[in-house]
Structures are given as structure tokens and as C-alpha cells.
Image (cartoon, rainbow, N blue to C red):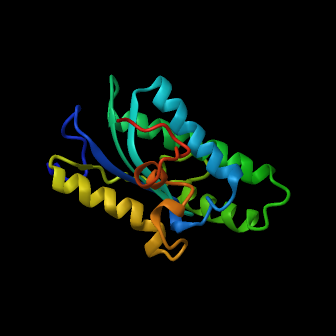
Amino acid sequence: MSSRYKYTDKDGCYFVTATVVDWVDVFTRDLYRDILLNSFRFCQKHQGLMVYAWVLMPNHFHMICSFRERNAGLVLKNIKSFTAIKIIDAIINNEHESSRNWMLDIFEKHGRENKCNYRFQFWQHENHPILLDSEKKYQQRLDYLHQNPVRAGFVFEPQDWKHSSAMDYYTNLKGLLVLEA
């Protein structure tokens, strides 16, 4: 069995990615971003999630993290399960969401296609964890993560993207999540 994209070292530091099905741009609204960020904060406080760097893009996130006391896959499964339910519920109940029907149709289509789902599927199933077992790998992923909004053309400098740890790395300001030292 391949060890690629698996949590092979329970004490290791990983680069993980989670993507919304069909790359739907959900995280363009504070309401949905806040659900995800609050879930990260809860898992930092109660489930041993240790965040070193992160970026939230309109349809996915990347994170460099490790896990204290808990199975890494379980923590990310909890985040994805909880946020999928909460975000879909928020979309359903948001009368002002102009893309509501379009998004729900996509999530429902994916939910029907996958027996593991009750009705909707929000996240793609894979997290693609990559063990960062060298300083070189860590630095490559850190740069990749922080440059993501720059490459997408959203900002000129990484630290200008509010939904990222770049502010913590490149300025004296603190970002939206508490980072491990």
C-alpha cells in the first residue's frame, strides 16, 4: 500500500489542502470564511491542531500543521464534516446569496454521486497530506502557500492577503489565527 498522501508520522508536520467540490468559490463571503476559521480555532483549542501557516483562497485552503494528542486524519475530518454542514446550512438560509441555487445544485449533485454523503457534498474527499520532513520541503510549501494569492492575482504582496498567515511572517501584525512558534 502506498504511503503517498497518508499521515505516516503521527508527530510529523504536514502540508494539507482541502478543496471545495468543483472548485466552487464559496469563501468569497465573510459568513462562510468565518465558519471555517472558527472551526480551525476550535480544533486548535480542543483537538490538538497546531497551525504553523495557512491560506484561505476562494475555493480551498492550504495549511502547514501538526497534531497533538489526536489522529491527524480525524481532526481534518472533523473540520471538513462540521464546516460542510454549517456552510451549506448558511447558504440555504442566506436569502441574499445570489449563487445559492447554483451552489446547492452542485453540492447536491456530488452528494448523490457519493454514497458516503447524506445529501450534499461540500469538500473533495482528499486532503493530500505531505509530510514536511526537511527544512527544504517546509520552506517550499511555506512559500507556495503564501504566494498563492499573489499567483492568483488577488494581491501584489503575500502579506496583503488578509486570509493567510503571511501577515504574521512578513510584518509585525498578527493574523486571524494564532500560530505555533
**Left or right of 149: which side holds 138?**
left
Question: In front: 13, or 76?
Answer: 13
Residue projecting furthest to the front: 172
Residue placed at 73% from the left, 48% from the top?
A: 90
Residue 20 drawn above or below residue 178: below
Residue 53 drawn above or below residue 142: above
**Left or right of 16: which side holds 157?**
right
Q: Position of residue 98 (x, y in %)?
A: 79, 67
Question: In front: 97, or 149?
Answer: 149
Figure quadrant of the C terminus: top left
Residue projecting furthest to the right: 95
Q: Position of residue 176 (x, y in %)?
A: 56, 44
Residue placed at 28% from the left, 45% from the top?
A: 14
Residue placed at 54% from the left, 61% from the top?
A: 161
Which image quadrant is residue 101 in? bottom right
Q: Position of residue 47 (x, y in %)?
A: 44, 26
Q: How many marks?
A: 0
Residue 138 drawn above or below residue 161: above
Q: Position of residue 52 (x, y in %)?
A: 37, 42
